[in-house]
Image: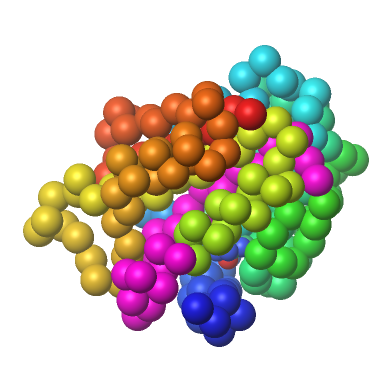
Amino acid sequence: MDRSALTRDVERYYSEKLRAHGATPHGVDWNSAESQLVRYAQIARILDDAPHASMTDVGCGYGGFLPFLRQRGFSGPFVGVDLSADMIATAVKHCEHDPKASFVVGDAPPSETDFVTASGIFSVRLSHADETWLDYILSTLDGFNRFARRGFAFNCLTSYSDANKMRPDLYYADPRYIFDRCKRLYANNVALLHDYGLYEFTILVRK
Ligand SMILES: C[S@@+](CC[C@H](N)C(=O)[O-])C[C@H]1O[C@@H](n2cnc3c(N)ncnc32)[C@H](O)[C@@H]1O
């Protein structure tokens, strides 16, 4: 897999969404603010009981997750990472009053952190083949595991979606496979959340 060619395609796709829709849920390709918040709420569960921890959000978009977390009492340092330099510039503005926030362009945490989160980075595979995209997901998760001291959380579209609603440019992961892999490779404490009304699942890995 040529990771940099793949991430270049993904970067272009999201930068274009931002240009078209600005710092809004549509600007990060979500179909509604409601669904974005439902996803945040699932991912944020990794931080339960750790309000002062450090965290890195990979695929932070325009930085929408940070105010959501602050409202819920999260007070730790936050690093947002995104492939798109335009997203990062927008996130810097969006969160300019948060003294504990920083943002960098990239596809991995810049350094070790307590928790890594990622909402929405594994869904849009464009024209990349199933095998290539699965490899990309798995190698990205290996990276999360290396950088996250205490745990990580991410979501994927589910292979249990209605067949007539599935799109060829999106990747629908098998939740059983991803759960099993996380349990075998990363930690004993792994939660699979597949009960929140979207065609996707969230995995929480607690080390
Ligand atoms: C669907 S949007 C979600 C944005 C944000 N997480 C949210 O929910 O508001 C996905 C974002 O992740 C970025 N992205 C996709 N793959 C990435 C990767 N491997 N590393 C870093 N950023 C990535 C995209 O540029 C885009 O801004």
Q: Is residue 202 left or right of residue 58?
A: left
Q: Which residues are magenta?
A: 112-135
Q: Position of residue 160 (x, y in %)?
A: 20, 45
Q: Position of residue 40 (x, y in %)?
A: 52, 37
Q: In this rendered view, identify the residue nearer to me: 67 or 154.
A: 154
Mark yes or no: residue 126 visible: no
Q: Residue at x 63, y 29 (%)?
A: 207
Q: Quadrant of ligand 1?
A: bottom right
Q: Residue at x 69, y 37 (%)?
A: 115
Q: Is residue 85 left or right of residue 123?
A: right
Q: Residue at x 80, y 46 (%)?
A: 112
Given the current orientation, which residue lies at the most extreme right position?
A: 99
Q: Residue at x 28, y 34 (%)?
A: 197
Q: Position of residue 7 (x, y in %)?
A: 56, 75
Q: Is residue 196 left or right of residue 49?
A: left
Q: In this rendered view, identify the residue nearer to me: 147 or 122.
A: 147
Magenta stretch encompasses residue 116: yes
Mark yes or no: residue 166 visible: yes
Quadrant location of residue 148? top right
- The figure's colour scheme reads rainbow
Q: Position of residue 48 (x, y in %)?
A: 62, 19
Given the current orientation, which residue lies at the most extreme top position?
A: 49
The vertical placement of 195 against 135, above or below, is: above
Magenta stretch encompasses residue 49: no
Q: Is residue 205 left or right of residue 181?
A: right
Q: How many marks?
A: 0
Q: In this rendered view, identify the residue nearer to me: 65 or 128.
A: 128
Given the current orientation, which residue lies at the most extreme left position?
A: 164
